[in-house]
C-alpha cells in the first residue's frame, strides 16, 4: 500500500515534458482486492496513509474523487479557487483538475475514488455540478447512508470475491452522487429536453476533452461527431447553460491558466501546446477570455520557476 496519498494512486512527477513543475500527476491503480474501478475510504485513512502531508502539495489526478464532510472544518483548493469545508460540504474533484487539500486535519467523512467511465449513466446535472457545494442536514444524512452502503458493498467485494459485482458498485455510486447533487429535481419538460440533448452534449464534451488543443472551432467537432453546429449548440446550452463555442473556449482557457501557473513553459510554448498558430493569437484569446494578458496571469498565480 502506497503512503504517497492513498492506496490507489502512484506518483508521476512529470506533467509536461518541458519545464519544472511542482504539480504531481496521480494515476489510478487498483488497491489490493479492489480491481473494480472504485475505492471507498475516509479522511482519517487519507491522513494515516499520508504521513508526509503530501496532500497539501498541488496534484492532478487522472480519476474522480467524491467526498462528503460529516464533521469538522477544513479548506480545499481547486483550479485557482479556495473552498471552505464545513459539515455538509460535498466535493467533487474531476480528472485533470489541479488541486490540493490545504487543511483537512479536522475533517471526517467518506471519500470515494473512481475511474472515468465507472459512474453508470450520465446527466447534465452531473456534468455541470460545481466542485464544492453544501447539503442541508437531511440530505447529508441520506448521502452518508448511500456512501455507507457503497462502502459496505465495496468491502464485501474486496474480502469475498464471489459477492463482487462491479455493476452493483457502479449503480450505488450513481445513487450516492444523484442523492448529493445540488440541483433541485427537474420539471417533466426539462427532463424530456435533457433526454434529447444529453447524448449530444456527452459526445461533444468528450470530444472537447480529447481535442481542445487541436480543434478550436465547433464546426470541427460537428464534422467529427456527425451533428450540425446548431444541434451541438442547443444541446450544450441546455446542459451547461452556455453555447458550444463558449464551452470550448472555457476549456482551452482553463488549460492555458494551468500551464501558465504551474509550469515554466514560455508563453510561446503554452501557445503551441494549445494549438495556436502563433503567440499573438494566443495572447489575444487569453486577454479576451481572462481580462488580462498571459504574463500578468502567470505573475499573479504562478507556482513554477519563471521561464528565462
Image: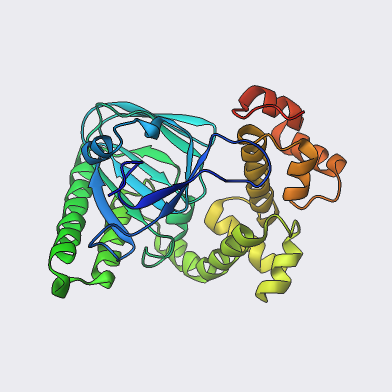
Name the residue: 29% across, 39% down: 135
Q: Give the quadrant of residue 132.
A: top left
Residue lying at 40% horizontally and 49% vertically, measured from the top left: 10
Q: Work out whether residue 146 or residue 270 is closer to the camera in this orientation and state it.
A: 270
The picture places residue 73, in percent across and down from the top left corner, at 28, 26
Name the colour scheme: rainbow
- Find residue 183 and report its horizontal and vertical position in percent: 39, 48
Which quarter of the figure is the C terminus placed in?
top right
7 horizontally vs 293: left or right: left
Q: Residue at x 47, y 37 (%)?
A: 99
Residue farthest along the top direction in this orientation: 300
Q: Is residue 67 above or below residue 161?
A: above
Query: Vertically, is 261 above or below 94?
Result: above
Determine which quarter of the picture holds residue 35.
bottom left
* Residue 157 visible in image: yes
Residue 86: give x, y in percent of width and height. 29, 29
Residue 292 visible, this orientation: no
In the image, taking residue 268 as reference, residue 75 lies left or right, namely left
State the count of labels.
0
Is 177 left, or right, of 116 in this rendering? Answer: left
Depth check, front residue: 268 or 53: 53
Q: Residue at x 29, y 59 (%)?
A: 173
Residue toward you, 211 or 306: 306
From the top left corner, tell me how far across and down residue 145 is, in percent. Answer: 16, 50
Amino acid at each position: 500500500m502506497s503512503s504517497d496519498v492513498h492506496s490507489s494512486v502512484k506518483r508521476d512527477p512529470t506533467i509536461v515534458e518541458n519545464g519544472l513543475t511542482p504539480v504531481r500527476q496521480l494515476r489510478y491503480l487498483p488497491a489490493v482486492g479492489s480491481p473494480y474501478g472504485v475505492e471507498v475510504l475516509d479522511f482519517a485513512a487519507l491522513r494515516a496513509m499520508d504521513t508526509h502531508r503530501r496532500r497539501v502539495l498541488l496534484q492532478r489526478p487522472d480519476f474522480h474523487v467524491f467526498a462528503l464532510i460529516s464533521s469538522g472544518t477544513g479548506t480545499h483548493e481547486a483550479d485557482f479557487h479556495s473552498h471552505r469545508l464545513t459539515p455538509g460540504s460535498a466535493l467533487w474533484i474531476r480528472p485533470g483538475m489541479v488541486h490540493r487539500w490545504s487543511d483537512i486535519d479536522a475533517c471526517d467523512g467518506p471519500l470515494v475514488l473512481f475511474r472515468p467511465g465507472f459512474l453508470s449513466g450520465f446527466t447534465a446535472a452531473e456534468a455541470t455540478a460545481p466542485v464544492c457545494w453544501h447539503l442541508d442536514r437531511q440530505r447529508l444524512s441520506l448521502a452518508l447512508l448511500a456512501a455507507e452502503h457503497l462502502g459496505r458493498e465495496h468491502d464485501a467485494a474486496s474480502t469475498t470475491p464471489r459477492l463482487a459485482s462491479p455493476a452493483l458498485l457502479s449503480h450505488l455510486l450513481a445513487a450516492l452522487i444523484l442523492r448529493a447533487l445540488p440541483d433541485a429535481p427537474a420539471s417533466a419538460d426539462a427532463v424530456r429536453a435533457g433526454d434529447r440533448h444529453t447524448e449530444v452534449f456527452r459526445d461533444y464534451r468528450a470530444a472537447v476533452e480529447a481535442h481542445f488543443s487541436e480543434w478550436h472551432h465547433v464546426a470541427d467537432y460537428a464534422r467529427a461527431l456527425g451533428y450540425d453546429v446548431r444541434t451541438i449548440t442547443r444541446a450544450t446550452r441546455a446542459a451547461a447553460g452556455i453555447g458550444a463555442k463558449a464551452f470550448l473556449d472555457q476549456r482551452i482557457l482553463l488549460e492555458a491558466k494551468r500551464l501558465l501557473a504551474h509550469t515554466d513553459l514560455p508563453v510561446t510554448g503554452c501557445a503551441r501546446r494549445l494549438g495556436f498558430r502563433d503567440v499573438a493569437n494566443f495572447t489575444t484569446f487569453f486577454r479576451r477570455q481572462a481580462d488580462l494578458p498571459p504574463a500578468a496571469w502567470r505573475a499573479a498565480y504562478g507556482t513554477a520557476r519563471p521561464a528565462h
